[in-house]
Image: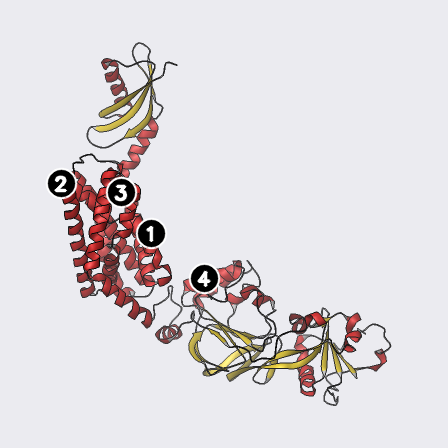
Amino acid sequence: MIFLVEEEDEKQTLPDHALLPMVLKITPDNLASVCLTSEDTVLFHISDEKICPFIEKVVDSQARALFLNHQVGGGFARAMGACVEPDKALDLTLLQEAQGALDILYCNDKPVFSSVSIGGLALLRSSLEPGKRFLQRLANIPVINHRAFVFETAKGVIIRTVASAILVIETRQTRMMQKMFGESFSKQDGRLDMVVLSPTSILNALLLLVQGTFSREMNIERLPSGVGLIQSRSVLLKSHGEIDYLHDGHKEKASELRFEIKPRALKVCMSPEAISKNADEEPKESVRINGLPRGEEAETLERRPLPLFRHASTDDFKELFAQIRQNARWNTQYFLLLWLSTVMATMGLFMNSGPVIIGAMVLAPLMSPLISMAMGTARLDASVTRQSSQTVVVGVLVVLFVSLGLTLLLPNQHAGSEITARTAPNLFDLAVALVSGIVGAYATANENVAKSVAGIAIAVALVPPLCVAGIGLGWFDIGMFLNAMLLFLANLSGIVFGAVVAFWVMGYTPLRIAKKGMGYALLFMTLLAVPLGYALHGMLERETTSRKLENLQLVLSGGMKIKLSNVYVGSGDPLTLAASLVSPRMPTEEQMKEIKHGIEQQMNRQIELKASIILNPH
């Protein structure tokens, strides 16, 4: 027998057909009196909101279902590829080979045709409507709250965490699931999909919102922080008090929720290509919860509003502090690497070789005790601060003495560009060190980016400035020594302050403790910023003067014209100025004095001119 379920005000749907008189209509009024058997077929042309009691009847009787493709309904079947066109409906009912079976998700023994959601799904739903209401969802991030849940899967895995939102669905071919995880899943595999959303900070929630709005999809193998995915045949969800949830858009509440997949529960007629080919083997359970908070972090999120930055967990503390204490102490390896890097850096400076100096930067081990010093400063841990400070001081003395000894042994007395470049520090060097300290602390706390430490060592270059200071001592050049030490201290203070801020942001120290250490580091950095700012001002002033004098043309007595090029303004008093003089003939001594006087008038100060002559008759 063929039965038809459709909207009450719907007109005849099926095309003219010889079997049409055999079709009987089922309505809510006569549903209880209709007796279905496994040989019957029920045609559905009804919205998902009204389909539930009819589907339950079909499942219980093991009758076949056929879903007609129509704009008034069919979302449930369309998502699983089970809709057919009305003109093919009766033909399909006669094709026994065009029969399949669909898994049905149940929530507390009630079938789910769309999804079950708990909490606010704003971050997930943003993937449905890219760009729309983004600012509104952004404003809701600070009021996100978490609730403690206990999950128990079909395999007996128990998960205790907190969540701000949970989405449960069986049909992966929904628009939301496609947007979130792509189309790599099978749509019928005997497992439900439970997406758990638990941002650990406002920043984490913001990143999830941006990813959900503008990114294509999440990587199922490496879910972002704050997102978990449970795939199992059943999940029992518990929490303290009653749980408010939406069941296919309808508000419900219960003390606990049991989600269960009944495989092959609904027999359907569909096109042969849409029939699931999955085997009837036991589905594999998958629990991806590495990005979800647990333990102390979960308890903190449940009690307090969402923090601006993620707070580190106890496990993170234990592992990182062990590493920090180890890096704070010196050992044989530390001295060996320091000695080798100092020799390489000093030789590279004398050779004026950038690659050799870069190799010394990578080899130098000074970055690790500085990060330990930052952690000790951030947490006011006297033992770590004292030990790391001793390691740094001893390292500085080793570098100075080794570079000084090499300078006294080698005959080279010429300062190349690699040496002079480290005798003119300014605020830019302090800014680079500040950023490097932040990245260094982050790399130390995260093994995945630990390889970046080599790049940080190159950026801040701790050993080469100390080597230049040692060279200055060997040459008895106090100015070189002081300028190189100023660069080293700028790097040191910037790294420590940046790392202290980073450790506070990552939750390794509370602000009430960290602010004292940050205050000390900021004071030291501010004192260094005064001479560095003065040096930066002088550098910018010299650059401006160089651009002003470039291509300047002077007309000398007798009508000879001189043009300046390749102008470089140095420092000192009087100011050193190097330039190429483009002249039709070699200037006389009197003309050189006239050129110097003309440049001094342009600069309104005395200079020491170092000129090279370029003859150009034209």
Callout 2 secondary element: helix
Contact (Cβ within 8 Å) of mark 3 with mark 1: no
Q: Amino acid at mark 2?
A: Leu
Quadrant of the rendered image containing residue 386 = bottom left
Callout 4 secondary element: helix
Q: Which residue is mark 3?
A: 426
Precedes in sequence: disc 2 or disc 3: 2
Callout 3 secondary element: loop
Q: Between marks 2 and 4, how big is the CA–CA gap?
A: 58 Å
Q: Which residue is mark 4?
A: 206
Kindly identify the residue that appears in the image at 25 percent across and 19 percent down. 597
Place of residue 434 in the rendered image (x, y in percent of width and height, measured from the top left): 30, 52
Contact (Cβ within 8 Å) of mark 4 with mark 1: no
Q: Between marks 3 and 4, how big is the CA–CA gap?
A: 36 Å
Q: Between marks 3 and 1, how big is the CA–CA gap?
A: 21 Å
Q: Between marks 2 and 1, how big is the CA–CA gap?
A: 32 Å
Q: Amino acid at mark 1?
A: Gly
Callout 1 secondary element: helix
Question: In the image, which is nearer the foreground, mark 4 or mark 1?
Answer: 1
Q: Is residue 90 rendered to the left or right of residue 219?
A: right
Does residue 469 sit above or below 413 in this rendering? below
**Category of crowding for the residue at label 2, using alpha-carbon neighbours closer than 10 angstroms: few (below 14), some (14–19), many (at least 20):** some
Does residue 156 sit above or below 605 in this rendering? below
Kindly identify the residue that appears in the image at 21 percent across and 48 percent down. 342
Quadrant of the rendered image containing residue 375 = bottom left
Q: Between marks 4 and 1, how big is the CA–CA gap?
A: 28 Å
Q: Which residue is mark 1?
A: 455
Q: Amino acid at mark 4?
A: Leu
Q: Which residue is mark 2?
A: 408
Farthest residue, direction right: 18
